[in-house]
Amino acid sequence: MSSTAGSRIVITGATGNVGTSVVRLLAEDPQVESVRGLARRLPDWSPPKTEWSTVDLADEGTDLAEEFAGASAVIHLAWAFQPTHDPAKTWRTNVLGSIRVFEAVAAAGVPVLVHASSVGAYSPGPKDRPVDESWPTHGWPDAAYCREKAYLERALDAFEGEHPGVRVVRMRPAFLFKREAASEQRRIFGGRFLPGPLARPDLLPFLPDIPGLRVQALHTDDAAEAYRLAVHRDVRGAFNLAADPPVDAELLGEMFGARPVRLSRTAARSAIAAAWGVRLLPASPHLFDAVLRLPLMDSTRARTELGWEPRRTATETIEEFLQGLRQGAGADTVPLRGRKVG
C-alpha cells in the first residue's frame, strides 16, 4: 500500500462513461485532496474537491505538463471512438494525444500513470477459457480501436524503459456499461437515429446467435473502483477487469425471453458493412470482426493484488444499461447527454 494521503489526481477524458465514475469515486475518497478533470467541453457538474480544465488532446499546442504539475497521479481515460470512417483523425487524438500525455507525465515529474487500455488490445484468443495478462497484445489490425490500443501498449513498453521511476498501471477492462452512459453508447455504436425504446423484450421474438459472439461486460462504476485502488496501491503492470458470466446469445435470450437463432458470421458482417458503408451505422464491420475474436479475460490478478471485486454481475450490468437505453438516460456532461432518439 502506497501513501497517497492528500493526493492530487488529474484525469483526462473526465466527462465520459468511465471518467464520470472515476471523478465521483475520487471526489468521495478521503485520501484524495483534489481532483482535476480535463475534457474538451466543460460539464454542468460540480462534484466536491473537483476543478475542470478545457483540454483537447488532438491540439499539439496544449501544455499538458502544466496541467499535470503537482499531480500525485494521472489517470488517462480520454478516447475518441468516432469518426470510424476517418481513422487518421482518431489516431491523432488517441495515439498521438496519448503519447503527449505520457511525455507530459514524465516532464511534470508525476510519479504514477494509470492508463486505460482495453480487452481490445489483446490478440485473438479463446472463447471457452479465460486468459491472463500475459496474452499477446497485438490487437486485431483491421479495427482502428484495437490497432490504437495495441500500439499504445508498445508505446508504454518504451515509456517504462525510459522512465523506470514512474509507476505505470494498465487497465484492460471488458465492455463497460452503466445507466448514465446508455444514450452516449447508442449514438457511438448504433447511431443517432436508433430509437432506444426498441430495447424491449416484447419487440424481440428472437436474437441472432453468431458464432464467436461471446464477450465480457463490467459495470463502469466497478471499473472505476479498480482505477481508484491503482492510485493508492503500490502495483504496476496490467490488470484484466471483467465480471461474470460471459455474455452470449443464450444469456441475452434468457434476459429478453427470446429464442436464439443461428446467424452466420458472413451474413451478419455483410449487413453491418452495408449499413456502415452508407453511414447508417457508426460501428464498423472491422470492429465486429475484432469482437468475434476477443479472448475472455481472467481477472485473478486484480482480485489478489488490487483487492478488487466487481459488485455487480454482467447480467445486472446489461439489465441496467438496457433500462437506461429505453429511458434515454444520461448525465450532466456533453458526452453523456441523455436522449432517446436524435
Image: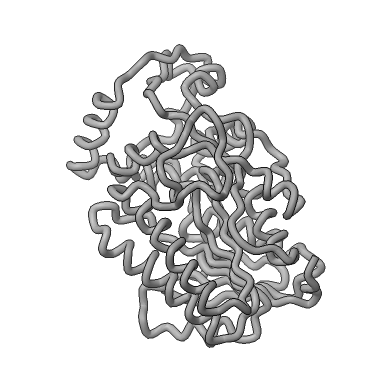
- Is residue 326 positioned above or below 263 on the image? below
- Residue 99 location (% of width, % of height): 43, 73
- In depth, the one of 5 and 27 nearer the eye is 5
- In depth, the one of 321 and 121 nearer the eye is 121
Q: Quadrant of residue 264?
A: top left
Total marks placed: 0
- Residue 245 location (% of width, % of height): 61, 29
- Is residue 42 positioned above or below 269 on the image? below
Q: Is residue 247 visible?
A: yes
- Residue 128 location (% of width, % of height): 52, 27
In-image side of 257 versus 308 (left or right) = left
Tell me what residue is drawn at x 40 percent, y 20 percent.
Answer: 209
Q: Quadrant of residue 230?
A: bottom right
Q: Tell me the quarter of the image containing the C terminus.
A: top left
- Is residue 184 positioned above or below 319 on the image? below
Colour theme: one colour
Tell me what residue is drawn at x 72 percent, y 69 percent.
Answer: 48
Q: Tell me the quarter of the image containing the N terminus.
A: bottom right
- In depth, the one of 142 and 62 nearer the eye is 142
Tell me what residue is drawn at x 69 percent, y 77 percent.
Answer: 8
In-image side of 224 versus 341 (left or right) = right
Q: Is residue 184 visible?
A: no
Tell me what residue is drawn at x 72 percent, y 59 percent.
Answer: 229
Q: Quadrant of residue 109?
A: bottom right
- Residue 141 location (% of width, % of height): 31, 50
